[in-house]
Every structure is written in C-alpha cells, then in structure tokens.
Amino acid sequence: MTSRNIPHLLEPLLEIEPSQSQSQILLTGILGANTNWLLLRYLYTLLKSSSASRSSPPSRPPAAAVSQPQGQRRLGTRMPIAAEPEFELRTSTHAQQQQNGGDAGDQGESGNESVGVLLVSFLRDFAFWKESAGRLGLDLEGLGRRGKLGFVDGLCVGFGSSGSDGEGGVVGGGGGLPVRRPPVPLAATGGSSAGATGAVPGRGPPQAPRPATTTTTTTTTGGSSSQRPVEGERWKRSLPSLAVADVSKTLHSALDELCQKNKKVVLVIDQLDFLLAATSDGNGLVSSALQDLLLDLREKSHATILTLSADDPLIASQVTTLDKDHASFVLSLAHEAEMVVSLRLLDTGIAKDVSGVVRITRGGDSGGEKQIEEKEYLYHVGGDGSVRVFERGQ
C-alpha cells in the first residue's frame, strides 16, 4: 500500500477486519469538505488486491530453444514443437480462470478472502468514479467484468445501463423528479430527417439507412416501465424509480449477485440522504423505511460504508420538516455505526495548504473487537487528486 494513494495515518482507519462482520461506517461531510477522496481510498483498500492479482497469460517458449534439423533450418520451415500442446493447455486454463472471474488470483498475495464491493451512488455517475479511481490505479471496468464490483446508478433514474453512451432527453417522472429517457427515433414518429431538421440533404450517392441498434430492453410491469442493462454490462444498474420499494428490489438483486461470486461483499452507498430529501413526506415514514432497508442489506453484507451530509442547517437548525427528517436520519445512523469519520473546514478560515479537518470518533455501536482511537487530523487535497494527511503543527 503506497503512501501516495493512502496516507499512512489513515491506514488503520481504512482496513476492515474480518471481525467487523455486519459493521457500519459513517462518513459525513459538509459543503466545501466532501467525502469523495475518503470514499475513493476505501474503494482502493478493498479492491487493490483484486486489481493487482490479475496476471498476464504465460508467454510462448522461444522457437530457438527447440532443436531442428539443419536442413529444415536452411529452408526456413518450422518443425512441430512438442511443447505447444502444453502451452495451449496452460493458455486455455488461464483464459477459463479469467472468464470465471479470476477466482484463483482473487485471493491476493497475502491469501485474503475474496471481497466484492457494491457501489451505490445517488449524486455522481459512473464516469466520475471511473476517472477518479483510475488516478489511484483501479480499473473499475475490469473489476466489474470480473465480478468484483457492482454499480447502481441512482442519478440517472430509469435510464437503463449507466454505461450507455447515448444522450437522453429529460421528461417528467414520478415523484416530481426528471427522469432521463433515450431519444425517440424519427422513424417511430413517422417523420423524416430532412423534415424534422429543415435541412436539405447534400448531393452524393444514396446511402443505405443505418441498422437500428438496441442497447436496452424495456419491460412493463404494473404500469411502470424499467430498462434492463445490456448483456455484458449487468454489473451496472440504474434505479427504475426513487420509490423505496424499487430501490430495495434493485439493491437486493445486485447484492445477491455479488454474494454468489465473492465470499464477502462490502456495501458502499454514497449520499443516501439525497433519496430521503427527494422522497420525504415530512412524517418520517421514508426515513424509517430507509433504516429498515439498511438493516436488511447489512445482514447480507460484510460491512456497510455510508456517506451523508452533515451541514449545520441540516443538523442544528431543523427549521423545516425536511431538516428534522434529515437530522433524525443522520443521528440514528450514527448511533448504529461502529465508527464515524466527519470532515469539516478549518475553524479559522481558508488556508492554501490545508483543505479541512478529518475527525475520527467511535459510533454508538463501537463495542466490537476493533479498538477505535479517536483522532483529529488535517488534510490537503491536491489538484491531481493526491491527499496528504498530517497532524497539527507538522
């Protein structure tokens, strides 16, 4: 584990021990001190062994090492090599291991058990996590194809696979939130491209129409439509809607699929409070439903990592019903957490070499075997994504 990616002061914090079964870790941030960099370090710690264990296939033995008759060498022909069937067998065995998810190499150099991660993000799409994790040396696409990572996109609701490159229009959706839909082809509306755009086609030989490509499959159940991801991208999902029942069904399905491929699965949910703010009715029913959902998910996962907003207007003021629901939701999860890591800005103002303060405290459920030492550090996030964590006075 390099200090370039993981600050040495945070190494004990990021390690999830085997004894921390069904534990919950809460990360809180505020405006100007978000938890993105810290959550990325958790992902790196959990997935680095799986990413490093991916080895290349064995190389073909050199032809010069096999003796050939002198006459054959002059003519430039090649005699059959007796070692080739063995090489083909080793290559096919390696390819079969890669197709099965790399189970033989996923134990890592230290022999740790296979760990999978289900990342659920409500405010950031997969492109953000892919680019940010790539700076740390993690290939999220490769990890997803090998069954080590699952991603649920809570930002593009009802848009199908988050890996599709098509641009969708925004139409009204359930719950008063915009739902992104793929653009409707012109052929389906009975119009032509020239009539729709008002442009005259240029001169030239006639071109054959492009064949339509289908990337998602739409199914209708109970009056609501949902889109399944394309084949080969099933580790990426999007929510059909922001209803708690649909969220629960999608997360349970993704978690069950990862549990079949990995011995342990860590659930990571980024900004779950956005779902509360988008669907809260002011009576506390949504907050209670989300807490029940988390309890069900924690029974299937080895550990759960949550990120929430803890700004003063949301926690201390509590003027509106949404503020009260948010404060109750955050405090309840803090009491259920084993450890709480909070980020805030400097009390004295802004400094060029300090981005904020990270504080580590024990949660309400800190009676496990892992001893959590309460600390407070300063941190600085560089323009290239690197992070430096240090104590006061250094």
Image (cartoon, rainbow, N blue to C red):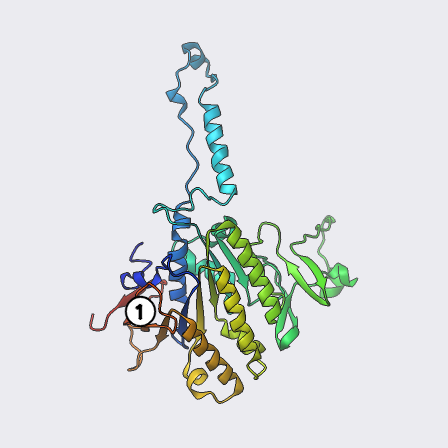
Quadrant where the C terminus is found in the figure: bottom left
Q: In the rendering, at what x and y percent does residue 370 appear?
A: 32, 63
Secondary structure at badge 1 equals strand
Does residue 199 appear in this view? Answer: no
Q: Report which quarter residue 6 is drawn in.
A: bottom left
Q: Is residue 370 left or right of residue 300?
A: left
Q: Amino acid at mark 1?
A: His
**Residue under the image location 59 percent in, 82 percent down:** 281
Quadrant where the N terminus is found in the figure: bottom left
Q: In the rendering, at what x and y percent does residue 115 appear?
A: 44, 53
Disc 1 packing (10 Å; few <14; some 14–19; many ≥20): some
**Residue under the image location 36 percent in, 74 percent down:** 343
Of 108 and 389, which appears nearest the observer?
A: 108
Q: In the rendering, at what x and y percent does residue 243 appear?
A: 61, 71
Query: What residue occupies the far left of the structure in this picture?
Result: 393
Q: Is residue 371 left or right of residue 279?
A: left
Q: Which residue is mark 1?
A: 380
Q: Is residue 194 left or right of residue 352?
A: right
**Residue under the image location 51 percent in, 73 percent down:** 291
